[in-house]
Image: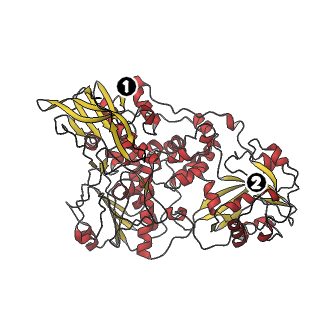
C-alpha cells in the first residue's frame, strides 16, 4: 500500500471551489476534485507576494512561448496600472521568486514592461483588458486623490458599474507617479496613457485643481449625493529634520524639490549638493529621519512594518533626488545616510546604478548641523555612526565621540520621508486620525470610523510602494461596493488543467538571468529614460528561466482507474533534485492534530487514503511518497517515468466567478471556513 502526497496533511486545510478542465483524462479521481487553498497559495509565491495578486508565473510562461498578447492580459487584468508597474514597481514578487533560491530571481518587472510596451495603452497596438463593466448601477462614489490608490479604486468601481468622480488637487492626475518620480525613470507619456485608459474604463470623471478643504469637504460630498467617499490623498508633505541650520538658504525638502522639478517649475540648486537620506532609519516614523511602510495583516492585531518595503521606498527617494540634482546641473552630488555601506537599503541595484552615474556615497554618517555663512549653506557637519539599532532592534542610533566630519556643499536636500496632510478633515466628518497622523481604517474593507467613508494608501498606512497602493485601491473598491450593495463578492474558481506529457524548455536551468539593457552613461542627460527594456529575444530567454510554480506534481493514484502506485521507485530515481522519497509508514510520526485534520477533511485525501481510516495511520504497514515542494523544479520527469499514470502534472489557474472578470483582493486574504464542492 502507498499513501501518496501525505506531506500535504501537515498544511492547514481550507476548502475552496475547484473547477476542473482535464483534456482527455476524465478518470474517476478527477470527477470530484478538491483543492487545498492553503497548499495552493504556498505554491504561488510570486502571486501571493504581489499586493495586487498578479499571477506573474502565468504571464512569464506565456512570454516564453511567444504568446505576448495573451500574456499581457494576464499581467493587466488584475492590475490597472500595469504599464507604470512595469517601469517603477519595487517588485516584491521577485523577492519571493523560487528561482532566486537557485541562482537569481526572474526579472518579472522588466518582463511586465516588455508586454506593456507591446500591448499597453502607451503602445502602438494596445489590447483591451478582459475586465469590463457588466452593467450600470444607480450609485456614485467620490474619490479624493488621483494617485495610484484613487485611480485603481476608480477603475474597479467603474467596472462594477458605479459612477465615479475623482477630485485631484494638482493640475495633473497620477499623484506622486507624476509629481514624485523623475521622468528618466517613468516617462510622463506612460503615466498619461495609463490614466487615460483608466478614465475610459467606464463612468469616471476627473476634476483637476480641486483640493479637499479648499474647494470642498468630505461632508459636502456626502450632501451632494455621493453614496461613498474614498480618501486617497497620498503623502505630499516632507518630514522635518530637527538640527541647527535647516532654515538656511540652500536647504530644501525632498518632496518639494521633486514636485517643482516634475512640474517644470524653475528651481535653482548649487554646484555641490548633499542629499540626506533616510535608508533603514525609516523604520521609526515618529523620529525625524524615519519612514515606514506597513504590511496589512489579514487578522486583527498589531500592524507590523515590512522592512523590505521600507528599504525599497527609502532607496527610491534618495536615489531619485540625487540623480535629479545631477541632471539639473550640479557638478557634484553626495548622499549621506546613517547606515554603513553593507547595511544600505535592499534596493542595491539602484544604489549601484547611482554610483555608476557619479553619485558619491557617504555611508555611516548622521547629520549634526547644517553650516552656514551670511545666511547661506556652506557645508554639513556629521557624526560617524556607531550603530543605528540597539540590541533590541529598536531605532536608537548612537555616534562615536569626537568624530565630527565636515562635508563642503552649497545645497542640502532632505530626503527623510513624507507625511499626509489631513487638515481638510473636520470633526463633523467623524473620521478618526491616529496619533501618528494617519487615518484609522478597517484593514479588510478600508472603511474609516465614519460609515461610507473609506481611506487607503499613504494617508492610512504611511508611505507605500506603488503596487501596495494599487492593492489598497482594489481593496477599497470592494469594500465600497459591499457597503453600498450589502452583498459579498463570490470567490474565484480554481481551474485545474491536467497536462499531458509535460516538458519544460530545453536547458532552462542553465539559462542565466538576462541583464536589463541600459542607456550608455554618456547619453544620460536631462530626463531621457535610462532603462531601455528587453528585446524579444532577451525577454523570451529570461522567461524560459521561470520554474512555473503554478504547475504542480500531483500523486493521486486510484485502484478504480488502474493508476495505483506500483512502488517501482522510478520517479525517485529520475528526480534531478531529490525531492521525492518513498518512506515506510512506521518512520512517520502522525501527530493527533494531523490525524484530526485528515479525519475532518476526507475530501482532500480520498485517493491517498483509499480504504484507510485516519485512525489507522501509525499502526498499519505501508509506504508513503513524500515530496519536498520547495525543491521541485517542475521538470515533469517523474510523470513521464511513471508507468501507472499515478503522477500527473497539473496547472492551477484562478478564474473570475463574476461577469466583470474581477477577482477581489479579499479572496486571497486567508481561510474561509465554509467548504464548497468542486464543479465537475
What is the x, y in percent for residue 598? 72, 68
Circle 1 sits in a helix, a strand or a loop, which is it? loop
Depth check, front residue: 116 or 591: 591
**Residue 82 located left or right of residue 622:** left
Q: Which residue is mark 2?
A: 626
Measure the alpha-carbon separation of dots 1 and 2: 53 Å
Image height check: is 367 above or below 154?
Answer: above
The residue identified by callout 1 is 358
Front-most of 215 and 249? Answer: 249
In the rendered image, the quadrant that contains the C terminus is bottom right
Decide: few, some or many residues near mark 1? Use Cα within 10 Å; few <14, some 14-19, many ≥20. Answer: some
**Residue reaching furthest left?**
374
Q: Quadrant of residue 329?
A: top left
Residue 483 x %, y %: 41, 73
Viewer-proximal residue among 426 and 71? 426
Any part of residue 639 in sight? yes
Q: Is residue 297 above or below residue 324?
A: below
Query: Given this view, does label 1 or label 2 mark the residue nearer the observer?
Result: 2
Name which quarter of the figure residue 201 lies in.
bottom left
- Residue 32 pos. (x, y %): 74, 69
Amino acid at each position: 500500500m502507498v499513501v501518496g502526497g501525505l506531506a500535504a496533511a501537515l498544511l492547514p486545510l481550507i476548502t475552496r471551489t475547484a473547477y476542473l478542465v482535464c483534456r482527455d483524462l476524465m478518470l474517476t479521481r478527477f470527477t470530484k476534485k478538491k483543492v487545498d487553498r492553503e497548499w495552493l497559495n504556498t505554491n504561488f509565491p510570486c502571486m501571493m507576494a504581489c499586493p495586487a495578486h498578479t499571477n506573474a508565473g502565468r504571464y512569464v510562461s506565456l512570454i516564453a512561448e511567444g504568446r505576448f498578447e495573451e500574456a499581457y492580459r494576464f499581467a493587466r487584468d488584475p492590475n490597472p496600472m500595469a504599464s507604470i508597474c512595469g517601469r517603477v514597481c519595487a517588485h516584491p514578487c521577485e523577492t519571493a521568486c523560487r528561482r532566486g533560491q537557485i541562482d537569481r530571481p526572474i526579472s518579472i518587472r522588466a518582463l511586465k514592461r516588455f508586454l506593456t510596451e507591446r500591448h499597453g495603452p502607451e503602445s502602438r497596438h494596445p489590447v483591451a483588458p478582459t475586465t469590463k463593466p457588466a452593467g450600470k448601477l444607480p450609485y456614485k462614489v467620490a474619490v479624493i486623490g488621483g494617485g495610484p490608490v484613487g485611480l485603481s479604486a476608480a477603475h474597479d468601481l467603474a467596472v462594477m458599474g458605479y459612477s465615479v468622480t475623482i477630485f485631484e488637487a494638482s493640475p495633473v492626475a497620477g499623484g506622486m507617479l507624476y509629481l514624485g518620480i523623475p521622468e528618466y525613470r517613468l516617462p510622463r507619456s506612460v503615466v498619461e496613457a495609463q490614466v487615460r485608459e483608466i478614465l475610459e474604463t467606464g463612468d469616471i470623471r476627473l476634476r483637476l485643481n480641486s483640493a479637499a478643504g479648499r474647494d470642498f469637504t468630505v461632508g459636502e460630498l456626502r450632501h451632494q449625493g455621493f453614496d461613498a467617499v474614498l480618501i486617497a490623498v497620498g503623502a505630499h508633505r516632507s518630514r522635518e529634520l530637527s538640527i541647527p541650520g535647516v532654515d538656511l538658504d540652500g536647504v530644501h525638502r525632498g518632496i518639494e524639490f521633486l514636485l517643482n522639478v516634475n512640474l517644470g517649475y524653475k528651481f535653482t540648486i548649487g554646484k555641490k549638493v548633499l542629499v540626506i537620506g533616510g535608508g533603514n532609519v525609516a523604520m521609526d516614523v515618529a523620529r525625524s529621519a524615519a519612514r515606514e511602510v506597513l504590511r496589512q495583516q489579514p487578522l486583527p492585531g498589531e500592524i507590523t512594518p515590512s522592512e523590505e518595503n521600507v528599504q525599497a521606498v527609502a532607496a527610491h527617494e534618495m536615489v531619485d533626488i540625487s540623480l535629479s540634482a545631477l541632471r539639473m546641473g550640479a557638478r557634484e552630488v553626495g548622499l549621506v545616510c546613517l547606515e554603513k555601506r553593507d547595511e544600505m537599503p535592499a534596493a542595491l541595484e539602484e544604489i549601484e546604478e547611482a554610483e555608476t552615474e557619479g553619485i558619491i556615497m557617504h555611508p555611516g554618517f548622521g547629520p549634526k548641523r547644517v553650516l552656514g555663512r551670511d545666511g547661506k549653506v556652506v557645508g554639513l557637519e556629521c557624526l560617524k555612526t556607531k550603530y543605528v539599532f540597539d540590541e533590541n532592534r529598536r531605532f536608537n542610533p548612537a555616534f562615536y565621540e569626537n568624530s565630527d566630519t565636515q562635508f563642503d556643499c552649497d545645497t542640502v536636500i532632505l530626503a527623510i520621508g513624507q507625511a499626509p496632510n489631513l487638515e481638510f478633515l473636520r470633526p463633523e466628518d467623524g473620521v478618526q486620525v491616529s496619533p501618528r497622523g494617519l487615518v484609522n481604517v478597517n484593514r479588510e474593507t478600508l472603511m474609516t470610523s465614519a460609515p461610507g467613508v473609506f481611506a487607503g494608501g499613504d494617508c492610512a498606512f504611511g508611505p507605500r510602494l506603488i503596487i501596495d497602493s494599487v492593492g489598497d485601491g482594489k481593496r477599497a473598491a470592494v469594500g465600497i461596493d459591499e457597503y453600498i450593495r450589502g452583498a459579498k463578492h463570490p470567490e474565484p474558481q480554481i481551474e485545474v488543467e491536467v497536462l499531458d506529457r509535460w516538458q519544460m524548455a530545453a536547458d532552462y536551468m542553465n539559462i542565466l538571468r538576462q541583464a536589463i539593457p541600459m542607456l550608455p552613461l554618456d547619453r544620460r542627460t536631462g530626463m531621457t529614460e535610462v532603462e531601455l527594456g528587453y528585446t524579444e529575444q532577451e525577454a523570451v530567454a529570461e522567461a524560459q528561466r521561470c520554474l512555473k510554480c503554478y504547475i504542480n506534481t500531483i500523486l493521486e493514484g486510484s485502484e478504480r482507474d488502474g493508476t495505483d502506485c506500483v512502488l517501482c521507485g522510478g520517479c525517485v530515481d529520475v528526480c534531478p533534485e531529490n525531492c521525492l522519497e518513498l518512506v515506510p509508514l512506521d518512520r512517520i510520526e502522525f501527530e493527533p492534530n494531523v490525524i484530526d485534520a485528515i479525519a475532518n477533511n476526507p475530501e482532500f485525501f480520498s485517493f491517498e487514503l483509499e480504504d484507510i481510516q485516519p485512525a489507522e495511520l501509525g499502526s498499519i504497514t505501508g509506504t508513503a511518497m513524500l515530496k519536498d515542494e520547495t525543491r521541485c523544479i517542475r521538470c515533469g520527469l517523474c510523470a513521464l517515468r511513471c508507468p501507472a499514470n499515478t503522477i500527473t502534472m497539473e496547472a492551477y489557474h484562478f478564474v473570475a466567478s463574476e461577469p466583470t472578470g474581477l477577482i477581489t483582493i479579499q479572496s486571497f486574504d486567508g481561510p474561509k471556513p465554509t467548504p464548497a464542492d468542486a464543479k465537475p
